């Protein structure tokens, strides 16, 4: 793809990145950061490509290390974010829920 | 898989990531947002394998992917909630390292003949990725308290950091002009050193902001690696994180009342913080017993609880909740005052209290609760220190000066539950401890709270 198209994609992505999180309460700062951290873990696909096209053993070893690190970033990032967020969404008021269930 | 399908799948992944960030910024949609992001990432990996039929060493690639996934999954499941911020820092660091390695390998496999623009992107990826890697590892060490949480100021540190920064930039430009692999290795080493030097002088209270900033850095590094690899997906994902991460860093800095530029360039402005405040004459504090505290609480009408990191370390959330339930039964109004950075990071305390099933409506954010302290009979500070330190309002030399604090000093009486007189994360002493209206209950937070609950039941 030519440079101008890539530059366009880059600039538009900057605006989307600013726009999507323009309003977020401080409670969610940590999970949001952790989630964003997991998203850049997708860099592992780049590592897969360079390792898969490695031309000698040095490149292959470096590539495999990159895959391991990238996968840690991606998988660990999403799992730890989910663990944080699970606590926000778990039913907090079992008593209230029960009374609702008891209603005919 | 044809390149058209691969391109469309890449577009789907990009949309997933945008929806993920959008979802993560609202409390109700956050969890689904994260799951959408994870689904996008999985799709990205599948498409990568399916669309490139020239990939070699497939068994090795799969194994490496499995090993990394297992390590990440295991670490994320096993980490204690109190240690979560440093794990996120570590994940961010390895992400930066991945981007840097990609740039290095791509160059070694014949990158010298590439255009200057590609070379510049390669150099940017390597430089920023390396800085993010060592910087993140250092924040991990600080949060894990494997090294001191105080700012570390080397002699002539400002000069050294500036010098290394300038040399790094020169070697980066040099590498673009006349690329050799030796120059790229040198650049990586310089960048790794720079990451350490920049984060060393950052004080405890600023560490979360730096993690967020390094997160944005890694995003930009990933975006640049996308340019090198001609991958639209990586450009979009990296840029999204870079942009939203920068904005998030600004929001966090604002919530903590920290000027962002000062934090970023702390390396160049930091001065050694003396311990003069804690030296000199031993001043007396009023220590108290669980029975005294129980009586004080029993005759109060309004109690505000300020939970801090110490509460979580002592695993005292459940004991605290028992105390609150007991007080509520007696018709005493109780609220939790949550400082934006209570714990180690914005929102960290909410996660820790949610773990103990504390009802959400009892948690009050700083702006909401601060006017309430004036009419509160008792404020109980459990394992918090810096977020209630009036020095943030009055002492211009304090490293936390300017940070908004909870106005605990306005309450009628203040009780500190503390293990010792050790200062908080920012490493400065707290005048409020010596106030005549303050009493201290020394001991493990869980232990003390259980004793107070027992005494209250016996009344």
Image (spheres, rainbow, N blue to C red):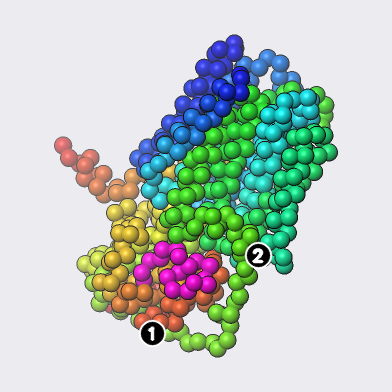
Expressed as whole percent of the image width and height from the top left, the position of residue B108 reads 79, 30
- For the residue pair B396 and B7, the one nearer the viewer reads as B396
Identify the residue at horizontal 71%, vertical 37% (top origin). Answer: B123
Expressed as whole percent of the image width and height from the top left, the position of residue B146 reads 65, 61
Identify the residue at horizontal 54%, vertical 87% (top origin). Answer: B282
Mark carried by residue B98: none
Q: Quadrant of residue B236?
A: top right
Q: Measure how far apart labels 2 and 1 are at the Cα level.
A: 34 Å
Q: Is residue B24 left or right of residue B131?
A: left
Mark 1 neighbour density, 10 Å: few (under 14) some (14–19) many (20 or more): few
User: Which SS does the magenta portion mostly show?
Assistant: loop
Q: N-terminal of the two: label 2 or label 1?
A: 2
As drawn, B282 above or below B389: below
Find out whether residue B398 is within the magenta segment: yes
Residue on which disc 2 sits: B152
SS for dot 1: loop
For the record, the magenta segment spans B392-408
Expressed as whole percent of the image width and height from the top left, the position of residue B296 reads 31, 78
Mark carried by residue B436: 1
């Amino acid at each position: 793809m030519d440079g101008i198209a890539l530059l366009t994609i880059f600039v538009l992505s900057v605006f989307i990145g600013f726009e999507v999180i323009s309003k977020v309460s401080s409670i969610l700062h940590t999970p949001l950061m952790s989630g964003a951290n997991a998203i850049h873990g997708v860099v592992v696909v780049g590592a897969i490509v360079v390792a898969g096209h490695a031309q000698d053993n040095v490149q292959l070893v470096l590539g495999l290390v990159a895959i391991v690190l990238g996968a840690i970033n991606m998988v660990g990032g999403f799992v730890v974010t989910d663990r944080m967020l699970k606590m926000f969404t778990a039913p907090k008021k079992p008593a209230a829920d029960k009374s609702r269930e008891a209603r005919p | 898989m044809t390149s058209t399908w691969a391109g469309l799948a890449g577009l789907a992944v990009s949309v997933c990531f945008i929806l993920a960030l959008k979802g993560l910024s609202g409390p109700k949609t956050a969890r689904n947002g994260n799951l959408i992001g994870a689904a996008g990432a999985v799709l990205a990996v599948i498409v990568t394998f399916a669309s490139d039929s020239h990939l070699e060493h497939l068994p090795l690639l799969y194994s490496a992917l499995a090993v990394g996934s297992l390590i990440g999954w295991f670490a994320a499941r096993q980490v204690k909630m109190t240690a979560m911020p440093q794990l996120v820092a570590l994940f961010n660091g390895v992400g930066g390292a991945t981007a840097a390695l990609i740039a290095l390998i791509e160059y070694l496999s014949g990158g010298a003949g590439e255009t200057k623009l590609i070379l510049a992107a390669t150099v940017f990826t390597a430089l920023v990725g390396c800085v993010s890697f060592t910087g993140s590892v250092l924040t991990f060490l600080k949060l894990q308290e494997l090294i001191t949480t105080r700012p570390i100021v080397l002699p002539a540190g400002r000069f050294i950091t500036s010098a290394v920064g300038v040399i790094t930039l020169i070697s980066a430009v040099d590498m673009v002009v006349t690329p050799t692999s030796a120059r790229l290795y040198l650049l990586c080493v310089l960048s790794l050193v720079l990451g350490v030097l920049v984060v060393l002088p950052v004080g405890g209270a600023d560490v979360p902001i730096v993690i967020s900033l390094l997160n944005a850095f890694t995003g930009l590094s990933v975006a640049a690696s996308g340019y090198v690899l001609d991958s639209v997906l990586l450009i979009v994902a990296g840029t999204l994180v870079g942009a939203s991460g920068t904005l998030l860093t600004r929001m966090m800095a604002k919530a903590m009342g920290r000027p962002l530029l000062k934090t970023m360039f702390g390396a160049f402005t930091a001065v050694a913080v003396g311990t003069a405040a804690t030296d000199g004459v031993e001043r007396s504090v009023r220590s108290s017993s669980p029975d005294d505290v129980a009586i004080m609480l029993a005759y109060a009408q309004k109690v505000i609880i300020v939970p801090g990191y110490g509460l979580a370390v002592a695993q005292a959330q459940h004991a605290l909740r028992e105390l609150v339930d007991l007080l509520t039964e007696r018709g005493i109004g109780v609220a939790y005052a949550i400082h934006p950075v209570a714990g180690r990071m914005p929102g960290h305390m909410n996660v820790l209290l949610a773990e103990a099933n504390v009802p959400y409506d009892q948690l009050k954010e700083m702006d909401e609760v601060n006017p309430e302290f004036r009419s509160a009979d008792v404020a109980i500070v459990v394992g918090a220190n810096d977020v209630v330190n009036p020095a943030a309002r009055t002492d211009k030399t304090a490293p936390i000066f300017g940070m908004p604090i909870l106005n605990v000093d306005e309450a009628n009486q203040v009780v500190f539950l503390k293990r010792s007189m050790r200062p908080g994360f920012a490493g400065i002493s707290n005048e409020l401890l010596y106030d005549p209206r303050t009493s201290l209950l020394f001991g493990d937070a869980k232990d003390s709270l259980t004793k107070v609950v027992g005494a209250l039941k016996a009344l």
